[in-house]
Amino acid sequence: MDRRDFLTDLTRTAALAAVVPNVWRVTTRPRLADDPFQLGVAAGDPTPTGGVLWTRLAPRPLEPEGGVDGQRVVVTWEVADDDGFRTIVKQGRATAVPELSYSVHVDVDGLAPDRWYFYRFRSGDATSAVGRLRTAPAAGATTPLRFAVASCQHYEQGLYTAYAHMAREELDLVTHLGDYIYEYATIPGRVRQHAGLEIRTLDDYRRRYALYKSDPLLQAAHHRCPWIVTWDDHEVDNNYAGSFGENGMESDDQMRLRRAAGYQAWWEHQPVRVPRARSWADLDITRTFDWGALARFWVLDGRQYRTRLACNGANDVVPCGDWADSARTMLGQRQERWLTDGLASSRARWQVLANQVMMAPNDAENGPVTRVSMDQWSGYPVARDRLLRAIADRAANRTVVLTGDIHTHWVNELHTDFSRPDRPVVAAEFVGTSISSGGDGNASPGDSQSARNPHVKWFANRRGYISCRVEPGAWTAEYRTVPFVTRPDAPLETPTRWRVTHGRAGIERL
């Protein structure tokens, strides 16, 4: 069997094993040495009538197969009106199998819209922690939404203190914009730099997710509310583009195999629906979610379909090489058409782009020349301007771009042409800093970028997240930061708050 046929069959296995309890001979009384639910539980991809519930059996998370040792285990799941599970409204069984790292994905349906539920899993004598699932409002409703934006949680570079604060907020959702793990090899201890080596195999990626998901603060944030997740580069390889790796030494087939391993491990550890793909290397994660008629979330994939990075692949003075070639793309033609056509047809009050890398350019060079990142949208200027023109024509000043990746907080006004500052503002971009990547950061002034980049309204180099409140007439973004992550118990600060008024150009500081 060739590689692609194998991966195709494995994808079909994923769809089957995730939801069907009796495909193989299974056990309801597994022989497990420890608690199998050490990686917690999670909910995601909410709809008005349900969502995806996730767990993974891993009594010894960092051992091969998580310590389950080849058993095929029946897992019972329950959804209730109350956290004591006195009124169970949905329940069922699924099978955890070694081919999928004993992960369980349950796509629950038949619940009432706009409601909180509680869920848990059971296996043998063990019972998981209890998580909360919030269903989306019914179509047509304009129920206000409160959600957080997170990304970039390098385990060795800091503690997940921001998640402890996030788990105390009254949130309906969390959007995670990628870099859930880092592919660099770990070294003993916490709050240290990576060793420079990289993981490449499926087992390596699985162990990395197990390490990250063992963190109790990350688990608490997952238990609090459903998440909508996408990936960025470090789920596979830093700054990869399509089938091109960072160092350029891997062949197309080698990179596809590595991508297949990274994508499969991502799916096995996230509360997302069964994949649509002919192979793991082609896993399609683009999707939409509606919060009634208030907001439509467009979950983008800015890695798998992009053209290879231009020029030197890092920061470079522009123009250079094929940087301005109109054929170069960030999203790929199919995804870009799906997005722009959808923006034209969506009747939601707000269009929300769950995006990986910064859309606004950041000129990093003093003086007459311009130096920008080739890995961000500024490395794909024609594609960026084409998308912003589509937003101007179809969803002007009701579109908000949510961004991660850059390990710093930004507030950016988006224009149709950044070479002409007089062009109208058509959208807002809220860039969230990292949870831990980059360490403590520093107390940089919030307007330090505005001289070279007038579209940048605020900037900060601290760890944290963004807390957003969305209403029909206005969107409020509160930037949360912690002063340190290299030691525990950092306090939460809110250094700035911003508002976008529906239909009005620009972002207002509160």
Image (tube, rainbow, N blue to C red):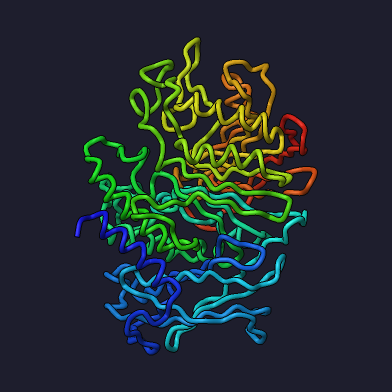
Task: Relative to 284, say whether 172 is above or below.
Answer: below
Residue 299 placed where, x, y %? 54, 48
Residue 275 placed where, x, y %? 43, 59
Which one is in front, 458 or 110? 110
Which one is in front, 496 or 341? 341
Residue shown at 51% from the left, 37% from the top = 336
Residue shown at 77% from the left, 35% from the top = 503
Q: Residue furthest top?
A: 368
Q: Residue furthest left?
A: 1
- Residue 181: tell me if it is visible: yes
Res. 401 image quadrant: top right
Residue shown at 42% from the left, 25% from the top = 327
Image quadrant for the N terminus? bottom left
Q: Residue furthest right?
A: 473
Q: Is residue 468 left or right of residue 58?
A: right
Residue 273 placed where, x, y %? 49, 62
Image quadrant for the C terminus? top right
Task: Relative to 409, say whether 422 is above or below.
Answer: above
- Residue 477: tell me if it is visible: no
Residue 374 placed where, x, y %? 41, 28
Report the number of discs.
Answer: 0
Res. 102 image quadrant: bottom left
